[in-house]
């Protein structure tokens, strides 16, 4: 008889994320995963019911990590401009600290493999309250959520992608994101979202 | 492989040749086993792993059941 080994479980999770990021969902097989984590296939099935369960658990855990990171010092009642700045800096830090997690979450965002009804509500609840409060106080225009998100956050994530990959437009030197560029972009975003 | 991480709970892991079409056949057989707490087959991976959570480590018994239904069933060893 053996007991549950937390370190082994963590290693399996890390390797699984690495595999999905580098090779896509179809690149993840329990055999390959066992090999890269130096455990047996049987060991993986001790911790995870099946491949779907593994992916779901990875998503749930990474979502939780992201939630904690993005809500640091964030007050949903704060002025929209201030709150968005905190969100940008928190999300930026999370992405730079966890580049694999960020790519993984991007892959998961639109995946049918994930049941989103079981995820941590804290993040969504805080962001919803933040937006509704800002609209009520006339600090933010009312938009369909997809448009709001595309203006409020997509520019940040695109800059982060340029930064992490070290690439830019063809023929341009590698892009390095700094605080002045963040502030410049954020002020344009805020301008676009002002009533 | 059998592992105990809760009192009286064993996880048994087998490599099989079970497919979607076989589920109807083995469902009643495995459900009838009172010592099995829950079971599932990972049909998305190449080993078609049968995973069983059970009160007892009755590995040989499970293999026998699957074999008598005409399926390959081998314990995956740690």
Image (cartoon, coloured by chain):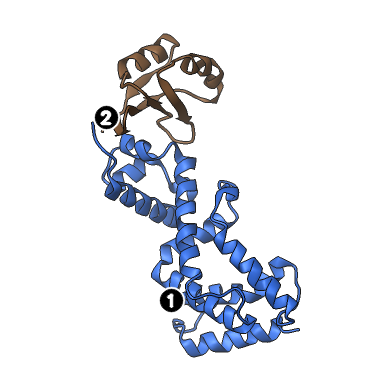
Residue B51, quarter of picture = top left
**Circle 1 SS class:** loop
Residue A166 is labelled as 1
Q: Position of residue A40 (x, y in %)?
A: 29, 38
Residue A34, compared with residue B28, is above or below; it is below
Residue A9 left/right relative to A130: left
What chain does badge 1 belong to? A
At a point 66% along the width and 75% down the height, the residue shown is: A151
Q: Position of residue A28 (x, y in %)?
A: 43, 46
Q: Would residue A169 be seen by someone viewing this image from the given angle?
A: no
Chain B display color: brown
Residue A114 left/right relative to A143: left
Chain A display color: blue
Residue B77 is labelled as 2
Residue A102 left/right relative to A142: left
Q: Could you classify mark 1 by the number of other residues whose Cα lies within 10 Å: few (under 14), some (14-19), or many (20 or more)?
A: few
């Amino acid at each position: 008889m053996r007991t549950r080994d937390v370190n082994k479980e963590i290693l399996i999770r890390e390797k699984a994320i690495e595999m999905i990021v580098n090779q896509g969902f179809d690149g993840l097989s329990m055999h390959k995963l066992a090999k890269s984590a130096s455990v047996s296939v049987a060991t993986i099935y001790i911790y995870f019911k099946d491949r779907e369960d593994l992916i779901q658990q990875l998503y749930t855990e990474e979502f939780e990590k992201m939630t904690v990171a993005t809500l640091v010092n964030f007050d949903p009642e704060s002025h929209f401009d201030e709150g968005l700045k905190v969100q940008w800096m928190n999300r930026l830090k999370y992405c730079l600290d966890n580049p694999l997690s960020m790519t993984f979450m991007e892959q998961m965002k639109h995946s049918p493999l994930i049941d989103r009804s079981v995820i941590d509500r804290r993040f969504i609840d805080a962001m919803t309250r933040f937006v509704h409060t800002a609209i009520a106080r006339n600090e933010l225009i009312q938009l369909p959520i997809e448009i709001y998100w595309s203006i409020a956050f997509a520019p940040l994530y695109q800059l982060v992608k340029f930064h992490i990959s070290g690439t830019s437009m063809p023929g341009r030197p590698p892009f390095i994101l700094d605080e002045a560029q963040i502030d410049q972009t954020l002020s344009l975003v805020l301008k676009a979202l002002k009533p | 492989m059998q592992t105990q991480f809760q009192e009286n709970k064993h996880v048994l892991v087998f490599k099989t040749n079970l497919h979607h079409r076989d589920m109807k056949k083995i469902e009643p057989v495995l459900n009838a086993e009172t010592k099995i707490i829950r079971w599932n087959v990972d049909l998305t991976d190449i080993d078609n792993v049968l995973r069983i959570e059970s009160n007892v480590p009755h590995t040989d018994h499970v293999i026998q059941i699957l074999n008598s239904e005409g399926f390959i069933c081998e314990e995956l060893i740690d």
